[in-house]
Amino acid sequence: DEVLRSVRSQLLLRWFGAEPEQRTLAIVSHGRGEGRSHVCAELGRLLAQMDEDTLIVDADLRAPTLHERFGIDNRTGLSSY
């Protein structure tokens, strides 16, 4: 948890700083089971706790999992739009 807090701080200071159009972050990995859903969910939670507008999009169309972490229904997803 402390590592992700440090990542959040660095993102806010260095990357999301002055330019509002630079407020998009993609968390990707090569294969399954590498922790991208965990990192995405936790980093999103940490940003939202700071009253930052936060939108998390689970773009894994084959095996989405973020809906389970947040207890959200999965009947309508990214491919529906």
Image (cartoon, helix red, strand yellow):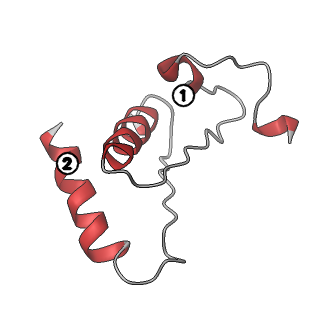
Residue 79 spot, x, y in % from top left: 82, 37
Residue most toward the left? 2
Residue 6 spot, x, y in % from top left: 17, 54
Note whether 48 is above or below 22 in the view shown.
Answer: above
Seen in the image, is 5 located left or right of residue 68? left
- Viewer-proximal residue among 73 and 38: 73
Note whether 11 is above or below 51 in the view shown.
Answer: below
Q: Residue at x 44, y 28 (%)?
A: 33
Q: Name the quadrant of the C terminus.
A: top right
- Viewer-proximal residue among 49 and 8: 49
Q: Residue at x 16, y 45 (%)?
A: 3
Q: Residues within 10 Å of mark 1 (few under 14, many from 20)?
A: some
Amino acid type at image mark 2: Arg
Displayed quadrant of residue 45: top left
C-alpha distance separating marks 2 and 1? 20 Å
In the rendered image, which residue does mark 2 sit on?
A: 5
Residue 74 spot, x, y in % from top left: 71, 19
Note whether 36 is above or below 52 in the view shown.
Answer: above
Seen in the image, is 9 located left or right of residue 42? left
Residue most toward the right? 80
Q: Name the quadrant of the N terminus.
A: top left
Residue 66, numbered label:
1
Amino acid type at image mark 1: Leu
Label 2, secondary structure: give it. Answer: helix
